[in-house]
Amino acid sequence: DADVTQTPRNRITKTGKRIMLECSQTKGHDRMYWYRQDPGLGLRLIYYSFDVKDINKGEISDGYSVSRQAQAKFSLSLESAIPNQTALYFCATQTGREQYFGPGTRLTVT
Amino acid sequence: GQQVMQIPQYQHVQEGEDFTTYCNSSTTLSNIQWYKQRPGGHPVFLIQLVKSGEVKKQKRLTFQFGEAKKNSSLHITATQTTDVGTYFCAGLGAGGTSYGKLTFGQGTILTVHP
């Protein structure tokens, strides 16, 4: 299912570097989300956006920022990456009932 | 804030055995959703439960929503190797700061031995 795409799919970066993860969708959904997945912790919400002008912090937003460039694009930035931000990151969209997830970006911070 | 606890974290079964995962929320939910994530994949929506006491079935999968709308369960009858993966519950907040946001449980990783 290529309706929600994420780039890059894998990234290794060094502590202190700025990195941007990108998400694009062709589903035409207004709502978009960024989650991180860590073993044993499930999916935790970082930021979410209900439309282009509406951006909200999730439960673990510290150290992250986002930009909603258009209805179809929602980017997540790590201003100064640290090792405990090593995780699998998912973008998701939603209209109505269910959320549709992208394939994920595996980020490693060394 | 809203918390959703899911147990067990891991479950290993022999093919043909049954499997159940449980979800409990710290607050009353508007609805609860279930997702499945295959190894190396992304979460995929399975079902949504909305009504108090609701029970839904999808082939060998049975989903229940508690009377108080604070707990839920997923039961798989006669597991198959195709059932392997991580099962997540996700509760939609009923109001306040939880409104409109899904809170995911920690997930249950199911392994099925042939």
Image (tube, coloured by chain):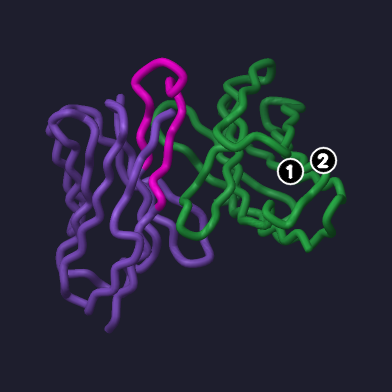
Q: Colour of chain B?
A: purple
Please determine if labels 1 and 2 lie on a single subunit.
yes
What's the amino acid at mark 2?
A: Glu
Q: Which residues are magenta?
A: B90-106
Q: Report how many numbered discs are placed on residues in the image.
A: 2
Marked residue chain, label 2:
A
The residue indicated by pointer 1 is: A22
Foreground residue among B9 and B50: B9
Q: Residue at x 68, y 57 (%)?
A: A86
Q: Position of residue B19 (x, y in %)?
A: 20, 64
- The vertical placement of A63 against A17, above or below, is above
Q: Residue furthest bottom?
A: B114
Marked residue chain, label 1:
A
What is the quadrant of residue A64 in the picture? top right
Question: In green, which chain?
Answer: A
What's the amino acid at mark 1?
A: Glu
The residue indicated by pointer 2 is: A79
**Label 1 element class:** strand
**Label 2 element class:** loop
Q: Is residue B37 magenta?
A: no
What is the quadrant of residue A73 in the picture? top right
